[in-house]
Structure formats: C-alpha cells, structure tokens
Image: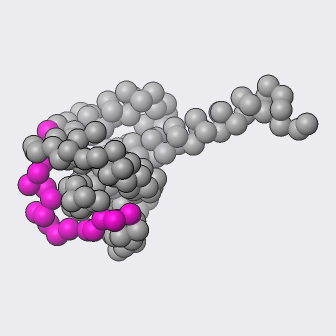
Amino acid sequence: MSGHNKWSKIKNKKAVEDARKSKVFSIHVRTITMESKRAGGDINAPALRAAIDRAKAVNMPADNIARAVEKGKSGGGADLEEVLYEAYGPSGVALVIEGITDNKNRTTPVIKHLLAENGGSLGTTGSAIWAFKKSVDAWVPQILLPLSDSEKEKVATLIDTILDQDDIKNVFTNAEF
C-alpha cells in the first residue's frame, strides 16, 4: 500500500505546483535578464521596472530577481531575444505567439511542427496581427471568431501545447471562448 499516506498526496501536489511555478519564474527570469541587458542594469529603466513588477506580482523571490538583473548587467548567459510568431489555428483562428529565446533557429521549427500537428500553420509577418491591437502587456483581438464546442477544444489544445514550450511566453487568439 505504498503511496497512499498523507505525505505522498502532499508530495505529489507540491511537485505539480512547483513545476508550474518553475515555468512561470523561468519566463520572468528571461524577461528580466533581457531587459537588464538592454538597460545596462539600471533598475529604474521603465521596461526593466515593469518586468520586475510583473515578477513580484507572481510572488517571485527577491533574490531570484536580483540574480536575473545581475546576470543581464554582467552580460552573462546567452543572448536572449524576443520573438513574435503569427499563425492560424484550426478553423482559421488567428494566433499571436510571444516568446523569449536564445536560438530562433531552434524555436521556429518547433512552433511550426506543433501548429502542423494540431491543424494550424505558421503565417508570415502581418498575416494574423491585423486581427489584434497591442495594449500594454497583451494583444487584444479586434474581431472575435465564434466557434463550435469541438473547434474550441481543438484551439484550446493547440494553445496548451504551444504554452508547454519553455521559450513561449504568451499565446493570444481571436477565438470567442
């Protein structure tokens, strides 16, 4: 009867929660490192300050934030860059995929493969972005596309699959959920 005591249940729940936090924290570390490199480590720079505030909003420890700022200031680590992919998913749903990567040549084929597996395709620059308007931290759809329940499920599966990638930060869609 191993694995049926209270500690095993707590341990399994904690492992799942820790994995989720780790993914969120790693995205924030990449963002802070990239912004710190751009700002030369000046924590009063608006973009770096905003990245730090977003990290604090998800309860990221201060020492992790300080290490990320220092890593960017010292030029350590790989060269991180922001990527923006435009794609179409199942039923012609427009997608905007944001990410931070150290190697575009690795990330782009992975995204292209995931889209193809789930009934989508990678678009060219300007092919899907027209359906969105940029706000402070998000891409807001200007036109919502109504979908049936089965189509919504396919789009949700595609978005979850893409978000499971380490280099991907956000996925925005114009599907009406």
Pick the front one: 75 or 176? 176
Between 7 and 75, the residue placed more toward the observer is 7
Residue 81 picture location, percent across and down = 29, 59
Drawn side of residue 68 relative to residue 136, left or right: right
Verify whether residue 134 appears in magenta: yes
Query: Which residue is located at x 26 percent, y 68 percent?
Result: 122
In the picture as drawn, the residue positioned furthest to the right comes out as: 1
Q: Is residue 136 above or below residue 76?
A: above
Whether the magenta-drawn stretch holds residue 64 is answered as no
102 lies above or below 132: below
Relative to 111, say whether 35 is above or below: above
Is 22 in front, or is 148? 148
**One can see residue 83 in this view:** no
Q: Quadrant of residue 69?
A: top left
Q: In the image, which residues are magenta?
A: 118-135
**Quadrant of the rendered image containing residue 45:** top left
Task: Classify residue 19 as left or right of residue 52.
Answer: right
Q: Position of residue 8 (x, y in %)?
A: 78, 33
Residue drawn at 43 percent across, 55 percent down: 161
Q: Is residue 127 left or right of residue 31?
A: left
Quadrant housing the C terminus: top left
Residue visible at 84% across and 28% down in the picture: 5
Q: Position of residue 44 (x, y in %)?
A: 24, 33
Q: Specify how the rendered protein is coloured.
A: one colour
For this view, does 136 lie left or right of residue 99? left
Say how many tags the image has: 0
The image quadrant where one finds the N terminus is top right
Residue 63 seen: yes
